Image: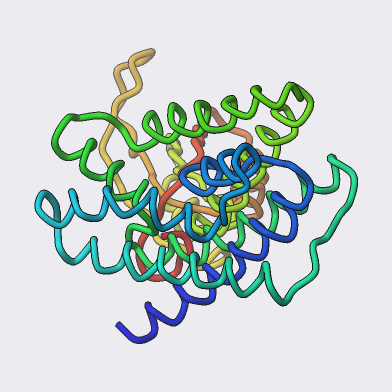
Amino acid sequence: MKKKLFWIAVGQFISACAYCQILNANDLVATGIGGLAAVVNRLTGMDVQMLLILMALPIFIWAFFSYNKKQIFYAGFSYLMFTFYVGIVNRYLPALHTDSIAAAVSGGLVGGIAGGIIMKQGVANGPESIVALYLKEKKGISVGTYYLIINTVVICSSIIFGNITMIIYSLICTFIMSAVTDKLIIGFEKYYNVSIMSDQYLEITQFIRDELNRGATFIQGMDTSNVKKKMLIQSVLNQQELIAIRDYVKSLQDDSFICASRSNSIIGRGFDVE
């Protein structure tokens, strides 16, 4: 638990830096309550830290009586760290003013790293996450759909400032942030589910085991062209291993058949994707 809280705190510090020093400093709109607070701040001049607290408080009160207490604890701690760091960063660290493209890219990268660190802990990272999980469990609304709607509304609300360009750059930043977060959670290595139909299944399996150091599974199949029984080999390989097995099967010069599909989540010994 202490390790999880530590990484949440680290992630939220990085997130606060991206929010204050890059996004707000360059008039880009963040997602969620943070983005809404920034929009209200520009309209009214109210303190961003106070706006973050006032906007989240009703959600946490509702969640306390309606949702999982453990998730509320982690979401509350995560959001508290973010709000606390926003005050620290705004007061003591300089804003990083730059052009809109650089701000969108750097804000997306830094914010995505922060999101990946927090999401890898498997907890709700703020009031928006609590609402997303509640709607998924109780109403059947997917988390992705919820975030797409709320983030689009928040970012597009900045149209009241009359700057369409900033909305476009904010959307680019959000896309980059989501992509980086996904990469940190899923991993950068690409893995493939590979199915091989061949008469020489023993030789291919030995190659997979000895040369690639991977396991394989046999499934009995049948070739409908000649109604002949064949053995289907299934294995999970990374990109380099897929190229190696493809070249090996080609060298057999028979009617062996390979089908490979990308796998986004692999859990188990010998794999890094979770």
User: Would you say 28 lies left or right of 239 here?
Assistant: right
User: Residue 43 at x, y = what percent?
Assistant: 62, 37
- Name which residue lies at 53% across and 76% down: 10
- Name which residue lies at 25% across and 68% down: 73
Quadrant of the snapshot with the C terminus: bottom left
What's the image's color scheme?
Answer: rainbow
User: In the depicted view, which residue is nearer to us: 269 or 40?
Assistant: 40
User: Would you say 73 lies left or right of 188 here?
Assistant: left
Say above or below: 33 vs 72. Answer: above
User: Residue 6 at x, y = what percent?
Assistant: 44, 82
User: Would you say 34 lies left or right of 223 here?
Assistant: right
Quadrant of the snapshot with the N terminus: bottom left
Say above or below: 34 vs 3. Answer: above
Say above or below: 252 vs 11. Answer: above
User: Residue 224 at x, y = what percent?
Assistant: 33, 15
User: In the depicted view, which residue is nearer to us: 170 or 92?
Assistant: 92
User: Residue 196 at x, y = what percent?
Assistant: 45, 38
- Name which residue lies at 31% across and 32% down: 142
User: In the depicted view, which residue is nearer to us: 30 or 122?
Assistant: 30
Query: Farthest residue toward the left?
Result: 65
- Name which residue lies at 48% across and 58% down: 50
Query: Farthest residue toward the bottom?
Result: 2
Tally of numbered discs: 0
